[in-house]
Amino acid sequence: MGIVGGAMTIARFRVEGDLVEGWRDIYRDRLQEHAFRDPPVEMGTEEVEGWVEVHNLLDAEFDDFNKWLYNNVALFALRVDKKRLPAKLFKATLEKKCQAWAAERGIERVPAAVRSELKDELEQEWLKRTLPAVSVTEAAWSVDGRYCILHSLSEGMADRFRKRFFRTFGLTLVPWSPLDFVSDKAGRVDSLLSCAPSPVRLGGAEVRLSQGRS
Amino acid sequence: MADEAEGLPVLPHIAGEFYAWLWWSSETNGAHFELGEPVGSVELWVDERLAFRNPDDTKVTAVMTGDNPAATLEAKAALAGGKVLQELRVGLRRDDREFLFTLKGPSMHLQALKLPQVVDEGGEEVLFERMHLYEEVVFVLGGLFASFSELRTTSRWVDEVLPGLHDWVLGEDSES
């Protein structure tokens, strides 16, 4: 499910800032520059992110406009990879390794420095054979319409997306407000801003659902 | 006025009141909304989900789902009990196109938006059509919100709408 098919779940942003002259070529290069790049196998637990095409998360080349620019709607996705180790299993395995190390040497306690070294070794070993968790969030940017929609309602994802969008295009994504619906109507926004919650409550003490309640 | 980078503020009570107004208007007008030009007339009805929160909280505390939950006593009782609508799943018809979506939270995000399938195949065509239909939903919502805000910012809100809402919640005939 997403922007290209199925049900849509949409956060909307206004795009603020001036488009650069010849934006098609320039934004293609910027997307390419900030595209997802496969991290080395031994990547740690840090997150790796970048732009990919919406049709396949393994396609991160934007040379061909036909694959991401439809009229003046740019379609791309933010891919975020993160490796996670199973914490309890990792801790138990480390404990066993420490016990084995101590038994070999006939001592009871493993020095902190050695423990740390064993931990790093185990982590590297496991990370090499761990596949990352991959998230892909689609976005469509209507360049003419000066808005962008993100197929996610997660605030964390929205923040991440806005930062990367700014780093890529130099344009600011401003979260859309319902008040934007009436921003072209003189005085309407200010009038709504001055509206306190309705003085007559629909519920609580103001209404009676039955004789027994006041 | 708000900082340009942050945009216009989001007013939680306005969203809750807008959802309640949509629900009430839909039931009292037989789902018909005459929005004038350029939007025209549309039909809107509450579909299979309403979610409420307490006025001072952001978490949903009561959810009504299933077949026509808007008609249940529990749904109106939630409003009568002082709860605020946080999510409203609605159906929308404009001309021969029918949409389903959930309006979610103070920002009125669109969740689980189902579009009419106008074009079956052709990657580019489908995308154009979907973007066009999404924009149509936003366009109609803009018309609905403009109508609501026009009422909300005048004395008609207090003189006409709130008494009507009050009577409707209690199941009273406003003419009586």
Image (spheres, rainbow, N blue to C red):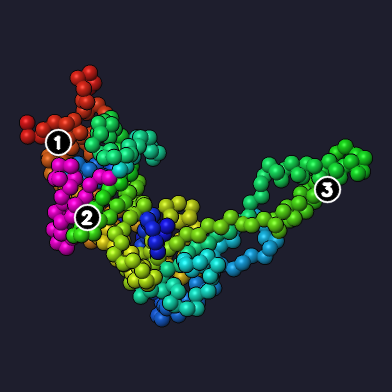
- Indicate whether residue B3 is drawn in magenta: no
- Disc 3, SS: helix
Region in magenta: B26-47
Please state if B45 lies on the left or on the right of B6 as rendered: left
Q: Which residue is mark 1?
A: B163
Hey, which quadrant is residue B54 in on the image?
top left
Q: CA distance from mark 1 to mark 3?
A: 75 Å
Furthest-top residue in this view? A212
Name the chain letter of the residue that bears numbered label 1: B
Please rate how many residues cluster around mark 2, counting C-alpha atoms within 10 Å: few if below 14, some from 14 to 19, many from 20: some
Q: Which residue is mark 3?
A: A114
Closer to the camera, B39 or B149?
B39
Amino acid residing under circle 2 = Arg
* Quarter-of-image position of residue B6: bottom left
Horizontal and vertical percent position of residue B70: 25, 39
Asked if residue A181 shows in the view, the reply is no
- The reply to whether the magenta stretch includes residue B44 is yes
